[in-house]
Image: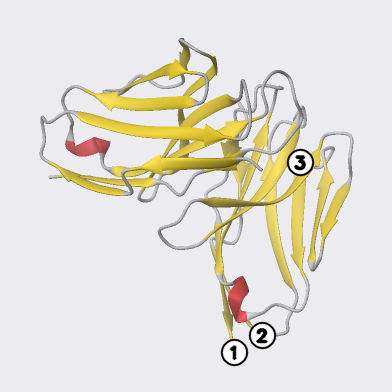
Amino acid sequence: KQEVTQIPAALSVPEGENLVLNCSFTDSAIYNLQWFRQDPGKGLTSLLLIQSSQREQTSGRLNASLDKSSGRSTLYIAASQPGDSATYLCGLTTDSWGKLQFGAGTQVVVTP
Amino acid sequence: SQTIHQWPATLVQPVGSPLSLECTVEGTSNPNLYWYRQAAGRGLQLLFYSVGIGQISSEVPQNLSASRPQDRQFILSSKKLLLSDSGFYLCAWYPGGRATGELFFGEGSRLTVL
């Protein structure tokens, strides 16, 4: 059974520092992996999607990598800003039906 | 462009009362639709998904049911709410068929059962 883990559960960094968020999974047979951002009381905003054949995706200050053999994905946020404060969730699918299985998330606080 | 709407945004219901949460998607056809619940300390859990009108798959046994009366409408219901039904309910959509696209979420409906 697939298990998705995000460590640490919470992270606080000063503005300008790079953020490194981890997502690990137990079964390498994934279909795709998606990173989301969630602000308090809000829905999920998609940040990056990595398909199983890809090793990384980039969008602006965000870069996500995928290493299926080690069961790990990492989200890098360069030069963090207070507006990056949110909970970051990774979710993955094991088939093409789009049924995401999520980690518990990492709550990030970027202090000015 | 595609958009997803959920309502109501917030509701407080007594134990034993019925529930109806609605989700509609615009700008796409034949999407896969999903209901997730985010309960305090328990993460996001997939409740139901649908690949077409009238086609509902349940992922976990529970007090809730789902229906898809139209292509872009997904409804979450309960006949009698329990305290344990409290949580943040999120609707999501995915390009129809066996696509490799992103999953997009609505703004959520926060349910408090008293």
**Where is residue A41 shown, x and y percent of the image?**
40, 58
Residue, disc 1: A112
Q: Residue at x 62, y 72 (%)?
A: A84
| Marks 2 and 1 in Cβ contact (< 8 Å) | yes
Q: Residue at x 26, y 42 (%)?
A: B86
Residue toward you, A48 or B96? B96
Residue, disc 3: A71
**Where is residue A72 shown, x and y percent of the image?**
76, 46
Q: In the figure, is residue B82 to the left or right of B6?
A: left
- Sequence-wise, which precedes: disc 3 or disc 2? 2
Q: Chain of mark 1?
A: A
Report which quarter residue A19 is drawn in.
Answer: bottom right
Task: Describe the element under mark 2 as helix, strand or loop.
Answer: loop
Residue, disc 2: A15
Tell me the kind of residue under disc 2.
Answer: Glu
Tell me the kind of residue under disc 3.
Answer: Gly
- The 10 Å Cα crowd at callout 1, few under 14, some 14 to 19, many 20 or more, is few
Q: Chain of mark 2?
A: A
Task: Describe the element under mark 1 as helix, strand or loop.
Answer: loop
Q: In the figure, is residue A10 to the left or right of A74?
A: left
**Where is residue A83 shown, x and y percent of the image?**
60, 75
Q: Residue at x 59, y 89 (%)?
A: A112
- The 10 Å Cα crowd at callout 3, few under 14, some 14 to 19, many 20 or more, is some
Tell me the kind of residue under disc 1.
Answer: Pro
Is B106 placed above or below A17 here? Answer: above
> Mark 2 to mark 1: distance in Å?
5 Å
- Sequence-wise, which precedes: disc 3 or disc 1? 3
- Sequence-wise, which precedes: disc 2 or disc 1? 2
